[in-house]
Amino acid sequence: MLQTTLSVPLDVKPESAERLSSLIDAFRQVEDTGKDPSSVNFGRLIEGIPTLHFMSISVFEDPAYDPIFILEINCDGPPGPFWKQLEALAGSELREMLRCCKEPLDRNAKLYRDVTADGLTAPIAPYLQAMTQPPSVFHHGNRGLRRHRILAEATLFRDVRAELDKKQDNSYFGLSAQDIHKALRERLLETYPWLDEDPEPRISRKERILDIARVVAFAAAVLIVLSLPGILAALLLPTGIYIAAVIVLFVVISVLLYRMHEPLPTTEVTTNFKLMSALTRQIPALFLVFSYPIVFAVLWLLQLGLGFIFGTGQTWVPQVTGIIMLGNLGLFVVLPGLVLWLRTLELRDSSQYKASIDPEKVAEILRHEDWISQNHMGSIVHIRPGVLRTLVARLGHRGLGLLLRVKATEGYLGSMRTVHFAHWAFLNNHSRLLFFSNFDQSWGSYLDDFIEKAHVGLTLAWGCGVGFPPTRFLIYDGASHGRLFKNWALASRTVSRFWVSAYPDLSVDQIERNFRVARGLRKAKLSAEEAKDWARDL
């Protein structure tokens, strides 16, 4: 994987929370040079950590918990080199922040004491790495583009524009797209010799195969586990009674689901999303997932054929295969049964129609936003209790994360073109859910984009949160309640006290545009049609 996303959550000593916030603010004031024309904002960190894309430091307050300090990073390659470079630049500042945090109760306590005790100067990198929390779901915008490549292609694009916009001796007027490509390449090749080099693949064939394999393996594993009750019932019950029970239970559960499928009054939100249409587009993937029973059927037929040819008779293979095939019929009870259980919980859930929002905190959040065209948000919500909720949340996040790796391969999150890096992570024994996002434009327009274009995934990922707007069958409604959802999300936000972007003037869309221009210039020759497509990005 070319990029890494993770966070380091640390519980804060309540008496040290105010001091910790002051330390973070002081660190920001030193690194953010403001309007000083002689230096780049956060330039020391950006230049000293060449793998850094985005980094944030936040403190979350919650009346049910002690404050929590979270360091979020998005970088190239594995995190080890990043931690060492960060420590070399800001080790003393981070050490003081860590002293405001609690000593962990597990085996990392010794690392904490070595880092924070007076007079000791043990490296902090091992402790940060040990306390790292991996994401449950993550998205990398402009996936597969390392930072140095993003910056190099941005510089190339600016030079291309400067060359085309020359007011004197401009020889590009009147040329065809092919001739413009040829002339620009010849003009820029000396300055950018890497245009003649083969670029690093954004997603290698091996990574692509592994991503697909993980989705299929995950879905098949879930399907097999859900088949186990049916297999057990097929072993214990006579075949006729088992099949009759499956039919009766399926009919009863279907009737109950039909009676409960209507949304509660005032909770339905009409959208363009159609579940059957979405499933239809995934028929090849669904066939791969559901093909595992076919393997048993083939084994059964093969064994019967060999037995007939060689006269060996039936063995355990067809017997076991028959039980498994019968057991799979249990899916017609288990799956609708789980949906019925979930729907029953949804009808009893309590949602916040007027989330508690602190005006002073909102004002402080706004003071830290819209200084550049990019912004950052951090949020923590409580997770609804219960066995099914826990399983749905964990498996839903796992499946959504794997699916994103397969689907979001073109630099964008579906039709959304504003998300650079984003991730969810479970905290405090999966009792709380963390969300971080680095995005283009303002927070309001960003959430509007999510609500309009990615409400299904957002509902699946965040629907387990306490107070989340009413959902229906896990994916409907929920985040589509625009005003309710935005108020709920705002109430869970915290102030982004420290936030660094390595390329603050570049949007997700512009990075992809730069990539396409550079990709065209890497080619010695373009066809007429290719040149026309390439020229649209100039």
Image: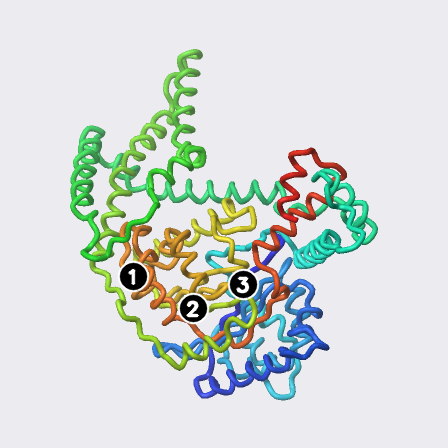
At 36% from the left and 65% from the top, the residue drawn is 486
Q: Is residue 501 visible?
A: yes
At 37% from the left and 20% from the top, the residue drawn is 314
Quickly name the residue at label 2.
379
Front in this rendered view, residue 160 or 453: 160
Front in this rendered view, residue 285 or 271: 271
- Up/down of 352 relative to 398, above or below: below
Mark 2 vs mark 3: in front:
2
Amino acid type at circle 2 is Ser
Say whether residue 110 is left or right of residue 523.
left
Mark 3 vs mark 1: in front:
1
Q: Secondary structure at mark 2?
A: strand
Which callout, 1 or 2, points at the residue further toward the start of the chain? 2
Which callout, 2 or 3, points at the residue further toward the start of the chain? 3
Disc 1/disc 2 C-alpha distance (Å)? 16 Å
Say whether residue 520 is left or right of residue 7.
right
Front in this rendered view, residue 173 or 223: 173
Residue 112 percent across, percent down from the top left: 56, 78
The type of colouring in the image is rainbow
Could you say which disc has been placed on residue 469 in the image? 1
